[in-house]
Image: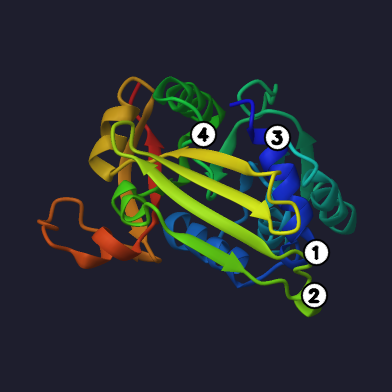
Amino acid sequence: MDWVEHFYSRTGHWWGEAESGIGDRDRGRVEHLHRICGPDPRRLLELGCGYGNTGAAFAEAGHRVVGVELTDRADRAEAHAARLGPERLRIVRGDFYTVAIESRFDAVMYWNGFGIGSDADQRRLLRRIAAWLEPHGTALVDVFNPLVWASWNGETELRQANPGRGYHHELQQETSFDPVTATAVDTWWDTAEPDRRITQRLRCYTPADLRLLLEGTGLALTGVLAEGEPVDLTADHAGDTAWLRDRHEYLAILEPTAG
């Protein structure tokens, strides 16, 4: 996982100005929590909080939030925390695989990042999440769908600069997929610096794979939202084109297991 800090710091430099404000995606995540857990104020832990905009949206909705961020995206998160105050939003700079946080939380959230490292790394993180949760707490974790990422194998995309919106770099993206390890390989570079390519590797899991991964972690899969809608995990989804082609991630709802 040596690539993580450099990859997210560099992409944060590319996108931070445009994407660090509170937007519709952040407010949508607040709605997901309220839909699943209810709207009452809660104590929340956000792993990989990035620019802090999602944590700030939760704080503005009345929750108390601790955000953990390894990269220098935390500098922008600190600006949100300074505006809201430490009782509402506190940023901890560190690696959430090793950071010491003694508190327990009503909910632990990990948006758009689960799958970094090996299966053993994911289990280690899931055990930490279980330890951070209150006995009746909930974890909300975005998980990448291997079926869609596999369909993107070999695709490239040019993303034009748009300085008026805060995007100052013209970027190229190239996606490939390892079918043996179910890992998405996502490579980016600034077209002005084509020799400075950076790559993230993201382990992907179907809900069935995720259930197997969760065994022995102290957490169980109790629900899934895809594009904000609940998924019936007991139904037959054969031929479901949304899962096969469109839903590149889904939100896993995890709860502590008895004992």
Q: Residue at label 1?
A: 17
Question: Quarter-wise, where is residue 36 in the image?
Answer: bottom left
Location of the N terminus by quadrant is top right
Residue 9 visible in the current orientation: yes
Amino acid on which the number 1 mark rests in the picture: Glu
Q: Is residue 227 above or below residue 249?
A: below
Q: Are marks 1 and 2 in contact (CB under 8 Å)?
A: no
From the image, tell me which residue sits under label 2. Answer: 163
Of callouts 4 and 2, the N-terminal one = 4
Instruction: Give the structural element (helix, strand or loop) at label 3.
Output: helix
| Residue with the most extreme front position | 195
**Is disc 3 in contact with disc 1, using a CB cutoff of under 8 Å?**
no
Residues packed near mark 3 inside 10 Å, few (<14), some (14 to 19) or many (20 plus) = some
Using the numbered discs, state the Cα–Cα distance from disc 4 to disc 1 in whole angstroms.
Answer: 25 Å
Q: Secondary structure beneath disc 4?
A: loop
User: Hey, what amino acid is under mark 2?
Assistant: Pro
Label 3 vs 1, first from the N-terminus: 3
Quarter of the image for residue 220 reads: top left
Image height of 8 relative to 193, above or below:
above
Residue kind at label 3, given as amino acid type: Glu
Residue placed most toward the observer, 258 or 3: 3
Extreme-bottom residue of the structure: 164
Left or right: residue 203 versus residue 82 is left
C-alpha separation, residue under disc 3 versus residue under disc 1? 19 Å
Between the residue at mark 4 and the residue at mark 2, the CA separation in whole angstroms equals 31 Å
Residue on which the image places disc 4: 116
The residue lying at 75 percent from left, 64 percent from top is 169
Question: Is residue 51 visible to us here?
Answer: no
